[in-house]
Every structure is written in C-alpha cells, then in structure tokens.
C-alpha cells in the first residue's frame, strides 16, 4: 500500500492551492483527479481569460447558511496575496467593471502558475483516477481505494467542487463523502445561471433575443444593476446571473430597464415643454425600437406626448421602470457558474477547513456551502480556502 501524508481529491483551483501550500511545508502530497487534465474549469472560466479575483472582496459578496464562515479564510489569504503570485510570474492582466481582474491572454496562465508551484513543492498529481472507497484507518488517517491502487494518508482533502457544469466533470462526490462521515449537506441549487421564461413570455420576448441593455433587477431581498441580455430561452447577462442566486422558484422579479431615469417625470416634463413627438419616437432615444414595440401597443405608440393622460403616462413608465416578470426557472447546473449550498459550514472549522468531528478530513472550495457573486469571488474563495487548509493538513 502506498503511504503519503496528504491526499487531495480534485485538481481544481482550491485543490491545487492546498497542494502547493502543504507541499511547501514538506508534506508529501498526492492529488487525485478523475479527469484527464487538471484545472479544466479554470481554463474555461471568464470566456477563457479567467476572472481570477476582484479588487474588492468582502464577506457580503458570498452566500452561505453560515454567513461569517468565509471571513477567516478571506482575511488570511487575500486578493492581494494572489495578485502577488500573479506579479511574481509576470502575468499580464486587466481590470474590468466592478474590480474584476482577468488575464490579458489566457486562463492557461493561471493554471500554469499553479502547476509550476506544485512542481516546485514536489506535489504528485495523478489523472484519470476513479475513487472506489474511502475508509478511516484507526485514529490516524484514511485509506483511499482507487481504480489503480490503495493509498493511506494522514490528511484527506475533498476539493471536488459542486454540481455546476456536469459536462466538465462535476459530480456530487463531496456531498457523498460528507454524508458518509455524518456531516450535514445544505440543499443545493444552481447559482449564477440564466433565467428561463414561461412559454407565453418566451414567445412574447423572442424577438428581443441578442438585445443587451443596462438594467436593475430586484426582489424583496436583493438588487443588482448590470447588463441584461435577452436570449431565445429567457434572460441572461451579468444582472440576471447575479440575481439568480437570490431568486426562489415562483418568485416575481421587478426589472427597471431605464436605471437612473424616472420615465414618468421625464414625460411630464416633456409635456410641459410642449414636446409633440410621438411616444414611439420619444422612447427611441432611450430604448431599442423592437423592445418598445413589444412592451407597448401601436395605438399608444402613435399618440403624441401631449395627448397622453396621467394614467397612460403611469402605465408607460411602469412598463419600463417597473417591469414585473415571473421566471419559469433557470437553466440549471448545465450552465450554472456556481452551486449554491453544499457541505454545511457549521460542521467545518473556519480556520483550518477541517471537519469538526472527523480528524484529518478537510473540505475546500465550492464543495462547501459558500458561493460568491459573479466577478472573481468564487476563485478568491478557492484560493483562500485551499491556502488555509494547506497550512493545516
């Protein structure tokens, strides 16, 4: 039987970071990955440019049933620490809106750094490995049986992520391990994912597919202002993805298609100025004509602004400043960027990421019930949680 100090299952962002840190501490580290390559989700992230962190990282950018859990790791390994690694390796990057940081060239730059650091720390990475079973070995570790061999270790780290994007190899493996050892798992659902619409709404708004505009999406608990994209299935774009993590099935959303503009006041002012434009021509300065023609009927569009009653003005303003729509659902894990829920953080040490009642068992990254906003926050959680576990395993 092969014996190592640390086995890490999963060669993604959090697993590789944990391996690097454990290796630096002279721990013998073996990373087991079921795919044929490490870091597949890193390579596809950010449209191939990897939104690797954000200039502004706070606990409020994360969802969890244990709201304070992420604070320890995020404060001990910060975005500035990861940026130091980027600078040391001379990786060119740029900032986009809201402090999001992307590689200038390719996400492979990030993966290459991680693999290079693993190499320096003498980390062994094995690919195409299927885990057959995990058993505790007395009070001093675990035995992991794979399709190739049995391996004993003192510390076992589960870094296999959540259920998002199954075509990239996502599985419920982490949750099954948690349940095997009596650790609760918070119910999971897709997050950072486009909305789908009911059939009648999908047909009504089909002509808007491909149209993007700035919008505010709100519900009773949260509000985001970002770009909204109409698709042939429903609503996407950053604002829809952000809101999806705070939406519950059957819930209505309010969408303001004219952020920063009070359309009712604008029209009333136009009337005072004796503006004789037709409604359709007046609205064309703010919104795409095809959008306006779907939201308002022709008889209203052909009226002069001066002919509008207060009731009609309120109706027009309501259509664009307070559009209400009830999504049918989301596109689910197939296109979700993150999994909400996961291994219950109340059962895990926020300092070491070790299970409170199972010595030597650790969970990091997306496997845990910690989900970030769109914008590099999930990668920062992967780096931070992996780093912290790497100091302890």
Image (tube, rainbow, N blue to C red):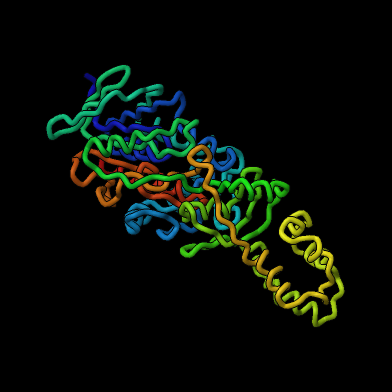
Q: Position of residue 274 (x, y in %)?
A: 85, 80
Q: Residue at x 33, y 37 (%)?
A: 174
In the image as oriented, which residue stretches furthest toward the top?
148
Q: Position of residue 227 (x, y in %)?
A: 63, 55
Q: Residue at x 46, y 39 (%)?
A: 164
Left or right of residue 321: residue 175: left
Residue 91 visible in rendering: no
Left or right of residue 73: residue 319: right
In the image as oriented, which residue stretches furthest toward the bottom?
272
Q: Quadrant of residue 275?
A: bottom right
Q: In which quarter of the image is the C terminus?
A: top left
Q: In which quarter of the image is residue 218?
A: bottom right
Q: Which residue is drawn at 50% across and 31% down?
A: 167
Which of these two is toward me, 336 or 370?
Answer: 336
Left or right of residue 116: residue 154: left
Q: Position of residue 302 (x, y in %)?
A: 84, 65
Whether residue 40 is situated above or below residue 96 in the rendered picture: above
In the image as oriented, which residue stretches furthest toward the left?
138
Q: Position of residue 369 (x, y in %)?
A: 36, 48
């Amino acid at each position: 039987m092969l014996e190592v100090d640390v086995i890490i299952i999963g060669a993604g962002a959090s697993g590789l970071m944990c391996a690097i840190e454990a290796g630096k501490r002279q721990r013998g580290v073996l990373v087991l990955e079921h795919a044929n390559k490490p870091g597949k989700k890193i390579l596809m992230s950010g449209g191939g440019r990897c939104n690797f962190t954000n200039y502004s990282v706070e606990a409020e950018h994360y969802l969890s049933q244990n709201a304070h859990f992420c604070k320890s790791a995020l404060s001990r390994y910060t975005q500035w620490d990861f940026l130091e690694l980027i600078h040391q390796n001379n990786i060119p990057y740029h900032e986009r809106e809201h402090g999001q940081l992307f590689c200038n060239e390719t996400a492979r730059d990030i993966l290459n750094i991680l693999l290079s650091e693993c190499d320096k720390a003498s980390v062994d990475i094995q690919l195409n490995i299927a885990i057959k079973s995990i058993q505790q070995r007395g009070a001093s570790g675990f035995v992991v049986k794979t399709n190739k061999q049995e391996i004993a270790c003192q510390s076992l780290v589960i870094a296999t992520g959540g259920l998002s994007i199954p075509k990239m190899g996502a599985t419920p493996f982490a949750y099954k391990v948690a349940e095997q050892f009596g650790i609760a798992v918070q119910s999971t659902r897709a997050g950072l994912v486009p909305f789908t619409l009911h059939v009648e709404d999908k047909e009504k708004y089909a002509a808007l597919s491909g149209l993007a505009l700035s919008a505010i999406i709100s519900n009773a608990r949260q509000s985001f202002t970002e770009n909204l994209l109409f698709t042939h299935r429903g609503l996407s774009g950053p604002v829809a993805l952000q809101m999806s993590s705070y939406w519950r099935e059957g819930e209505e959303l309010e969408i303001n298609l004219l952020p920063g503009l009070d359309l009712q006041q604008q029209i009333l002012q136009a009337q005072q100025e004796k503006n004789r434009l037709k409604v359709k021509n007046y609205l064309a300065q703010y919104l795409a004509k095809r959008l306006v023609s779907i939201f308002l009927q022709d008889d209203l569009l052909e009226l002069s602004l001066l002919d509008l009653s207060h009731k009609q003005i309120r109706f027009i303003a309501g259509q664009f400043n307070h559009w209400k729509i009830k999504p049918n659902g989301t596109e689910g894990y197939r296109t979700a960027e993150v999994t909400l829920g996961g291994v219950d953080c109340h059962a895990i040490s926020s300092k070491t990421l070790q299970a409170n009642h199972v010595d030597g068992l650790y969970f990091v990254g997306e496997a845990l019930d910690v989900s970030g906003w769109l914008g590099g926050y999930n990668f920062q959680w992967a780096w931070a949680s992996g780093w912290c576990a790497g100091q302890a395993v």
